[in-house]
Amino acid sequence: MSTIEVTVISGRSLAQARSRERGKFSDEYARSVSVCELDPEDMRELGATDGENVRVTTRFGQVILRAAASRQAPHRGTAFIPYGAWASMLFDPSTHTSGMPTLKGVKAIIERAPEAKVATLQEITHMKAE
């Protein structure tokens, strides 16, 4: 199984902002934030196709997301995951007294996981509570 190493960053996305109007428990919102955008070259190296599930693992945790080829300028070695419960599984929960965790610059391993299921928001929330 092929893997790639990337640096994960997180932020708001336009799709996330639009879908949030339907509510954070809507399917549309979940689809907009349970995605890992990768440079098309990184996707080819990984052997993943658009929409295929991938496992993203950092030293803080792991999560299954849908891979998506980024339409942004080339950014080999960087993965973008929108803010949300799925991204929160991958970053240091400490805020270091700032009130906001650092949601950028975390090294991750990404591997194909086509048989794995993307967790629902309810499942992610339960995982974090354990």
Image (spheres, grey):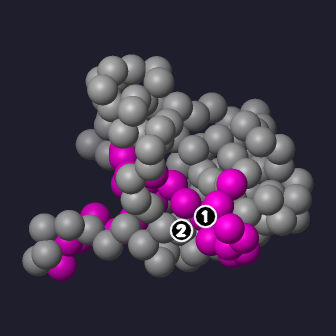
Which residue is rendered at x = 63% and y = 54% of the image? 37
Quarter of the image where one finds residue 111: bottom right
* Image location of residue 78, percent across then percent down: 62, 71
Which residue is rendered at x = 73% and y = 63% of the image? 39
* Residue bearing mark 1: 79
Horizontally, residue 21 falls left or right of residue 104, namely: left
Neighbor class of circle 2 (other Cα within 10 Å; few <14, some 14-19, many 20+) is: many
* Image location of residue 2, percent across then percent down: 86, 61
Quarter of the image where one finds residue 64: top right
Neighbor class of circle 1 (other Cα within 10 Å; few <14, some 14-19, many 20+) is: many
Q: Main secondary structure of the magenta part?
A: loop
Q: Is residue 42 magenta?
A: no
Q: Is residue 73 magenta?
A: yes
Image: magenta residue range: 71-96
- Residue 73, above or below 38: below
- Whole-Å distance between the Cαs marked 1 and 2? 5 Å
* Image location of residue 71, percent across then percent down: 69, 54
For badge 1, the amino acid type reads Ala
Q: Secondary structure at mark 2?
A: strand
- Residue 26, above or below 99: above
* Residue bearing mark 2: 8
The quarter of the rendered structure image containing the C terminus is top left
